[in-house]
Image (spheres, rainbow, N blue to C red):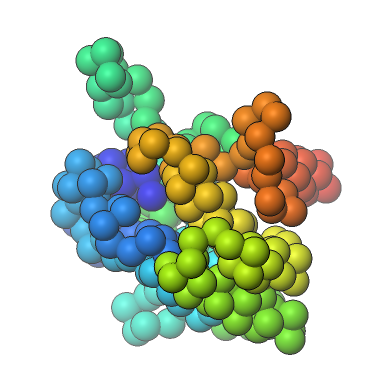
Amino acid sequence: MDLPGWQVLRNELAPQGIEIVTVGLEMGGVDVLRPYIDDAAPEHPSLIDEAHVMDALFGVTNIPESIWIDEQGQIVRVRDAAVPPPVMRPNADGELEPYGMGGRYGFDADADANRLREWAANGASSRYVLTPEEVIARSVPRPMSVSQAAAHFELAQHLWRSDGFGERTLSHFAQAHTLQPDNITYKRQAYSAYSYGRSDGSEVSRFRQAPQEGEPWPFVSDFTADMARLRAERDAQKQQQQ
């Protein structure tokens, strides 16, 4: 969620009328994310989407993504990467180091913040504001396979809560991941829950979303492979634009 970075950016842009709302997608619920929210102590609204409503309503398929909504409640930009510039925070040794995803996994550390700054300065005339037709064109279509993936993901969550990672649970996760392979939020939730469930309860295991050497891995992909594919796609898009 990069909350410290968003808090800094929110404090910068709030006087110009921009309010930032962060939404954490977490099927484990509030208790999983509460320590991170409490640590960051954001002054902006910080919500938890346990049921992945953002996926269904806005077509979110990965985090971080952003949706811009103007004063009239109109969506004016949708489905950009949403990475604030990193902020300096002390590490476990007390040394300051950059915190956040800006500059990692191929994300530009400043591009998203600079777009927001331009919108704050120019409002509806911003060159980044999209027409309603452009917003619709950029939105993710919802064919039957996507609806079926959502149903399988919901069933997987229900079974995970009642039975853990049994065969039925894994089967429904696999169906969701296969039917909508570009929905990284579905995959990352399963990766994190699986790694955490097999660990000694260490919080760091929630961020281990790929198999260790020799470890059985019951999913169709893993976070490392997913990010490599997405980075290659971003690099290809940049080359086409040049």
Q: Nearer the viewer, residue 63 or 109?
A: 63
Q: Residue at x 63, y 44 (%)?
A: 223
44 left or right, relative to 184: left
Vertical arrangement, residue 69 with respect to residue 201, above or below = below
- The quadrant of the picture occupied by the C terminus is top right
Looking at the image, can residue 13 be seen?
A: no
Q: Position of residue 141 (x, y in %)?
A: 69, 80
Q: Within the image, what quadrant is residue 25 found in?
A: bottom left
Q: Nearer the viewer, residue 46 or 224?
A: 224
Vertical arrangement, residue 42 with respect to residue 213, above or below = below
129 left or right, relative to 172: left
Looking at the image, can residue 158 be seen?
A: yes
Q: Residue at x 68, y 27 (%)?
A: 213
Q: Residue at x 27, y 26 (%)?
A: 89
Q: Position of residue 238 (x, y in %)?
A: 75, 44
Q: Residue at x 43, y 68 (%)?
A: 161
Q: Position of residue 214 (x, y in %)?
A: 70, 29
Number of numbered markers: 0
150 left or right, relative to 189: right
Q: Nearer the viewer, residue 226 or 72?
A: 226
Q: Position of residue 72 (x, y in %)?
A: 35, 84
95 left or right, relative to 69: left
Vertical arrangement, residue 96 with respect to residue 37, above or below = above
